Image (cartoon, helix red, strand yellow):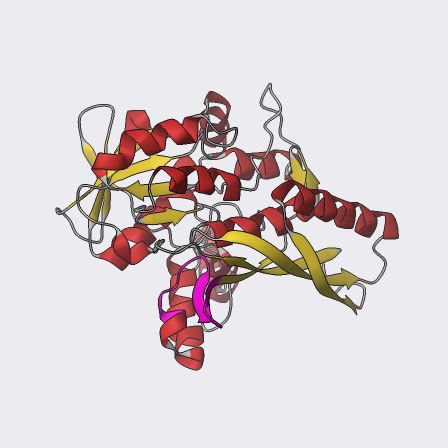
Amino acid sequence: MADLATEAAVDPANWTCPAPLRDQPVVVMGHGGGGALSAELIEQIFAPAYGNPTLAALADSAVLDLGGARLAFSTDSYVVRPLFFPGGSLGDLAVNGTVNDLAMSGARPAYLSTAFVLEEGVGLDVVGRVAQAMGAAAKAAGVTIATGDTKVVESGHGDGVYVTTAGVGLVPDGVDIRPQRARPGDAVIVSGPIGLHGVAIMSVREGLEFGVEIASDTAPLADLVAAMLAVTKDIHVLRDPTRGGLGASLNEIARASGTGVRLRERAVPVPDEVANACGFLGLDPLYVANEGRLVAFVPAPHAEAVLAAMRAHPHGGGAVLVGECVEDHPGMVVMATGLGGTRVVDLPLGEQLPRIC
């Protein structure tokens, strides 16, 4: 009876749930995860407030007609913790992430802006390392950091360094790449092994060792996209599967185009070290973030040639055909499992690994 009395005295208001609730009246971490909560935040708050046809496409970057040129324009903020990790840093992500968002529209990135939010007390050597990494990444990506801004917040009101970058690039004539263009029959190609970035961040953040160092895949992908477009300009969709991973990106494309996607589990390139780490942590590699990978929807007649071009590029050497776009189950992603069954790959609610980009 004493145990029952104790249980009855527990205040339900103090209970916590590992998954964010859909009817939360306040922002929760899942709103930044690239899953269903992120989509609801955009659809219910931002899209109605900003509503316009350009924004309605909801692609990685907006394509604008300006002065006779077709420009791609994108912006992104980076709040990764820790700031430095195997294979990269906040600085690399801030450049490569925006470069890749532009490239997913087929654009050739040209100029970036950057804004730093610094917390009072952070070491100037730390800020310098981030800035140096950004400069080196910009040089490697062939872009110029042309303008920027800096703000400082009081100690305890930030997390060291936050960075926002925006970028512009030129879209070649005849290129029309957007999620709405996926068509049944398209081959679905992934440019290389998935899950490395998210697992690299988590291993450092939590001090975990998996017997081998797992490094982030962060890389600029504009040259890879250019190599693909040199084969054919008729590439339907490109997406870099960052927050929410490959699973979230494929769901967004399926819903935007009203088509289905069918994956083959054994074809999805999950490295052994990622699979082992995810098994230990209880994560699904399909939803783990990447920062140097892309997924492409390519018309079947061009698929083999595009795949060969990708494999000939340093950032596409591990490219594989993982599935196809189908008429069945429109708006849904399904996977043929290794055991001969089928499972639904749904849009995640929040995110498995917060603060990874």
In this view, the residue in front, 218 or 231, is: 231
* Residue at the image point whose x is 44% and y is 79% from the top: 50
* Residue at the image point whose x is 33% and y is 41% from the top: 232
Taking the view exactly as shown, the residue that stands out farthest to the left is 328
Q: Answer with the quarter of the image where residue 217 lies.
A: top right
Determine if residue 284 is in view: no
Q: Is residue 135 left or right of residue 307?
A: right
Q: Is 230 in the magenta?
A: no
Q: Residue 352's spot in the image, x, y percent? A: 47, 46
* Residue at the image point whose x is 39% and y is 56% from the top: 173
Determine if residue 161 is in view: yes
Q: Residue 158's spot in the image, x, y percent? A: 72, 62
Q: Can you say whether 282 is above or below 41 in the image?
A: above
Q: Can you say whether 40 is above or below 307 in the image?
A: below
Q: Is residue 190 left or right of residue 112?
A: left
In this view, the residue in front, 186 or 126, is: 186
Q: Which residues are magenta?
A: 55-71
In this view, the residue in front, 133 or 48, is: 133
Q: Residue 162's spot in the image, x, y percent? A: 69, 58
Q: How many marks?
A: 0
In this view, the residue in front, 302 or 274, is: 302
Taking the view exactly as shown, the residue that stands out farthest to the bottom is 49
Q: Answer with the quarter of the image where residue 49 lies.
A: bottom left
* Residue at the image point whose x is 34% and y is 56% from the top: 178
Q: Residue 190's spot in the image, x, y percent? A: 38, 35
